Image (cartoon, grey):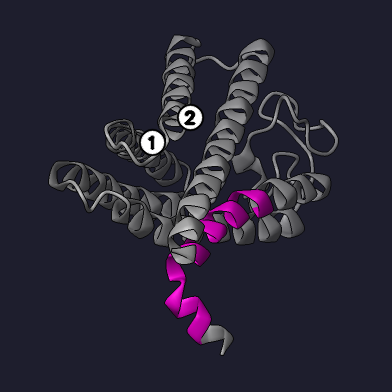
Amino acid sequence: MVLLKIIKNWKLFASLFIIFGPAQYIILTAVAMLFYAGGTMINPLSPGYYFWGNFFSDLGRVIALSGAPNVVSFTIFTTTAIILSISFIPFAFVISSYFKSNKKQYLVARIGSLICLTSIVFLIGTILTPWDIFDRTHLMFANLFNLTGVLGIVFFTIAVLYNKNYPNLYGFVYIALLIIAVIYTIVLVSIPKAITLDGLILQASMQKFSQYSFLLCFLIQGYGAWKLQKYKVKL
């Protein structure tokens, strides 16, 4: 009975799933930070997880930067990150369904969905290649995820802003995320390649700001899609 209800209202549940995905990631990465085995790129003796000096990828290391096994943090981080990745898949299909009344907007949204699905593949690739073992592959997947993710959001932004029935607020949220992504990219390019304490703190802090903004954006997008879908179900 429950399964039939989920199948019938899968778009509604997909919208709720994209709320659940980022929410559980925020909570469980915080838990993973408590179990991180220590060390930063500058100071291997640094105890535990330094919020302003460690990256999210450090949580997914098999061996922490301190040289100690990082099994608990690795397991929690990998699990929550995979759940986050999966939560974007049904949303990528749902988002385009709101624009079927206009062929051009629907095409733009479908392209955005296709790019989004591609970026999810790269995200999963990033997660499954811990950077202490697959450093170059991990970085490649991460860069491809960022590039395709930004491109997909550009298409979603265009579709939302040109649709009269989809509140422009959600388009502006996408724009805010794009601005943050551009600033983050500029900062990364501007920082000298040689790692310094100040440079590490700046990079780690900007990553936190960028990633939490990304998660907040899709919490808001999921809520907006849920409201629209709930309204349709009532009708």
| Residue at the disc numbered 2 | 173
Nearer the observer, 41 or 179 = 179
Furthest toward the bottom, the residue is 1
Q: Earlier in the sequence, mark 1 or mark 2?
A: 1
Q: Is residue 5 magenta?
A: yes
Q: Is residue 178 magenta?
A: no
Q: Which mark is residue 143?
A: 1
- Total numbered circles: 2
Residue 138 is situated, as x and y percent measured from the top left of the image, at: 45, 45
Residue 28 is situated, as x and y percent measured from the top left of the image, at: 72, 53
Amino acid type at circle 2 is Val
Mark 2 secondary-structure assignment: helix
Amino acid type at circle 1 is Asn
Q: Who's the residue at 77% across and 49% down the image?
A: 68
Nearer the observer, 94 or 113 = 94
Q: Main secondary structure of the magenta part?
A: helix
Q: Who's the residue at 49% across and 13% down the image?
A: 187
| Image quarter (top left, top right, bottom left or bottom right) of the N terminus | bottom right
